[in-house]
Image: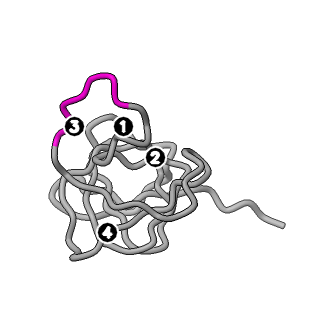
């Protein structure tokens, strides 16, 4: 059985390209859509969907998917469950198309 490495769709030089997730660098804009594995922890920049929910049960123990937002979270002491503007690499999307920055 062959192992298929994780990949990421990113914007580079003004175009969307697919790269191995191991080649992501800080500042990359990652493009993700429904069913994608999140290739790296990232801050949400934009959401192109009316409903945006993500399953982060493995990270937080929450039994239901949660909504995410692009706004800045002002609380410097916020725990992972409160970081509604972040995506974490152990999750996959339930619904939405979005851009996020690594």
Cβ–Cβ under 8 Å for marks 1 and 3: no
**Residue 23 figure quarter:** top left
Q: Tell me which label, 3 or 2, sits earlier in the chain.
A: 3
**Residue 77 figure quarter:** top left
Q: Tell me which label, 1 or 3, sits earlier in the chain.
A: 1
The residue that label 2 is drawn on is 88
Does 94 sit left or right of 68 as displayed? right
Cβ–Cβ under 8 Å for marks 3 and 2: no
Marks 1/2: CA distance?
A: 16 Å
Q: Tell me which label, 1 or 2, sits earlier in the chain.
A: 1
What span is in magenta? 72-78
Q: Is residue 34 magenta?
A: no
Marks 4/2: CA distance?
A: 15 Å
Q: How many marks?
A: 4
The residue that label 3 is drawn on is 73
Crowd rating for badge 4 (residues with CA inside 10 Å; few <14, some 14–19, many 20+): some
Name the residue located 34 percent from the left edge and 61 percent from the top edge: 67
Looking at the rendered image, the disc whose residue lies closer to the viewer, 4 or 2, is 4
Question: Viewer-proximal residue, 20 or 39?
Answer: 39
Q: Percent x, y for residue 39?
A: 47, 51
Cβ–Cβ under 8 Å for marks 4 and 2: no
């Amino acid at each position: 059985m062959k192992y298929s490495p994780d990949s990421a769709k990113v914007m580079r030089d003004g175009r969307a390209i697919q790269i191995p997730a191991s080649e992501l660098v800080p500042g990359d804009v990652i493009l993700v859509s429904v069913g994608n594995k999140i290739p790296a922890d990232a801050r949400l920049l934009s959401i192109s969907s009316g409903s945006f929910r993500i399953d982060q049960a493995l990270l937080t123990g929450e039994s239901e998917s949660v909504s995410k937002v692009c706004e800045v979270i002002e609380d410097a002491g916020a725990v992972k469950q409160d970081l509604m503007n972040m995506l974490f690499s152990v999750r996959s999307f339930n619904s939405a198309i979005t851009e996020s920055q690594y």
